[in-house]
Amino acid sequence: MTQTLHADAKTERIIADFPILARPTSRGKRLVYLDSAATSQKPRAVIQALVDYYEQYNANIHRGVYEIAQRATDEYEQARVKLARFIGAKTSEVVWVRNTTEAINLVAYSWGDQHVSSGDAILLSELEHHSDLVPWQLLAARTGAQLRFIPVDARGIHVLDDLDRLLDGCKLVAVSHVSNTLGTIAPLETIIPRAHAAGAVVLVDGAQGAPHLPLDVKALDADFYAFSGHKMLGPTGIGCLYGKREILEAMPPFLSGGDMIRKVEYTQTTFADPPRRFEAGTSNIADAIAFGVAADYLSALGMPWVREHERALTGYALKRLSELEPRGLAIYGPRDPERSSGVISFNFADIHPHDLASILDTEGICIRAGHHCTMPLMEKSGWAATARASFYIYNTEADVDALCEGLEKAARVFHI
Amino acid sequence: MDDFYRDYILDHYRSPRNFGTLEQPDASAEDVNPLCGDQIRVELKLDDGKISDVRFSGKGCAISQASTSMLLESVKGMKLAEVAKLPKDAVLENVGIGISPTRMKCAMLGLRVLKSAAIGRLADWPDEE
C-alpha cells in the first residue's frame, strides 16, 4: 500500500479532529508536533467525553443507586470492554491503572514478590525505559534475584544469539514492545515462545506498542501487557494492565482499600476477583471513559492503517534526514522502517540536542531532547543526549519537511 | 531563543575558557541539570581566601557551557564570601538576552556549582533564591 501523504484526505480529516493542531504558536507558526512518543495530542471526541462526564453524569461508580451513578458505572465498565476488544483480551483481564509505570510496579510487587526469589533471574533488554528497569532493580534488591539483559547491536536491534542461555533460570522476562528512544520493534514472536519454553512469565511494556501497532495479546501470548492512555489519544492518568486471567486470579492485591474487596471484617478481608482486586479507591472515572473513546477513534481508523501511515512516514523521514548526513547529522536506531515504529533519534554536528530543540521551537516544531529515560542505553551507546522526533496519525510529510527546514536554520545559527 | 546563539556564545561553547582540571584544587563541586543531564564540575585554587585559579569541566548544551565559561572569566581574585553572594545577574548580564524560562536552569548550572564550591555544600539554584 502506498500513500501520498501530502494529499491524503484521510490524514487531513484526522488533523481537523485535533483542536490543538489548528492553534498557531505564540510566534504565529504552525504547530508541528513531533513528540507523540512523550504524549499524543487528543482528538475533540476524547476532550468532549471528559466534558460530558463532568457536565452530565459526574458521580462515583459501583455504589450509587441513582440514575447518574448508574450511567457513570455503565460508561466506565463499557470503556473497559472497549479496551479489552482493542487488545484482543477478555474484559476481566483488563485492570485500570494510572499508566504503564503503575502497571509494571503492580506486577513487580504483586506477582514479583510472590514468585521471584534469591537465585532467580529477571531478563530485560538493553533498550528498556527506566519504568521497565527500576521496578525490576527494586524487585531484585528485595529478593536477591539477578538482572540480565538481552543485548542490542549498534542500530538498537535485539541480538538473540544467547537468548536460551539468558533464559536459563529466568522467572520473568520484561521487554518493551517498541523502544521509546530508537523505535526498535522487539522480536516478541521469538522472545515470548522461547521464554515460555524456559518456564518464564513475560511482561510486555506496551507504552509505545499499543498506540502504534496492531495488537492481539492472545496471539502474542504475552502474560502481561502494560500501556498508557495518554500516548494513544487518551487523557493522562489512565492506563491498562492486561494479565492472563489465571495469573491475575492467583495474585495478591497491590494497593488495598475501598472497591477492591468482597467482604471486610475488623481483622480480615476477602478480596474481590480481578480486575477489581487491583483497583483500590475511586478510579479515574472520566479518564477511563475518555480512554475508551480514544480506543474507538483508533479502531475506526484501523490499526493496520495507523501502522502503515507511520511506516511510510518514518521511511520518508529517514530519507530526508539522510540528506543531511554529509553535514554531520547522525541517525541512531534501525534504518529499516519495517523494524521501527515512528521514532527517530539523531544528533546534528556539534549542536547539543537541547539547543537544537530550542531553535526548532522558534519555528513551532516540538521535538524531545535528552536521555529519554533510557540512561543506561545512552551510556552504552556513548551518546550524552539525543534529539528525538516521533510520529503519529496526524503527522504528514509536510511535518518532516518542516523539521528538515528547522534543521537548516539550526545549521545557519551554529554556522555549520 | 535563536537570538541567544550569538557568535561570542558559540565561541565560548566551542572554545571554553578555563576548561580542564587543576592539580590539587583547594575547593571543588559538581552538579547536573536534572532537566537535561548537563554536567559541570568547578575546581578552585585559593590564595589567602581569594580565588587564584579556576577550571571547569563537563558536557552539555551551548547555554550551560558558554554561561560557565563567561562567568569564570571574572572570578579570579574574588573572595569566597563574595562568590557565595553572586546573584543570578552575574550570569544573565553575560547571556541574558533570549534565555527562555525552560532553559534558565541550563544558564544557572555553572553559577550554582561555583557557589557550591565556595560554600562547601550544594548551593540553592540562583534563579530560585
Image (tube, rainbow, N blue to C red):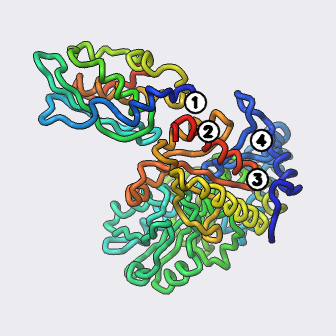
Labels 2 & 3 near each other (Cβ < 8 A): no
**Toward which corner of the image does residue B39 lie, by quadrant?**
top left
Kindly identify which residue carries mark 3.
Answer: A396
Q: CA distance from mark 2 to mark 3?
A: 20 Å
Look at the picture and state if A416 lies above or below A158: above
Give the residue displayed 39% in from the left and 62% down from the top: A139
Q: Chain of mark 3?
A: A
Contact between marks 2 and 4 (CB within 8 A): the answer is no
- Disc 1 target residue: B2
Q: In which chain is the residue bearing label 4? A: A
Which quarter of the figure has residue B9? Answer: top left
User: Residue A18 versus residue A97: which sits nearer the camera?
Assistant: A18
Q: Are marks 2 and 1 on the same chain?
A: no
Which residue is label 4 attached to? A21
The numbered dot on residue A409 is: 2
| Element assignment for label 1 | helix
For mark 1, name the chain. Answer: B
Asked whether, in this view, residue A100 is left or right of residue A215, the answer is: left
Q: Mark 2 and mark 3, same subunit?
A: yes
Closer to the eye: label 3 or 1: 1
Look at discs 4 and 3 and give the one toward the viewer: 3
Crowd rating for badge 1 (residues with CA inside 10 Å; few <14, some 14–19, many 20+): some
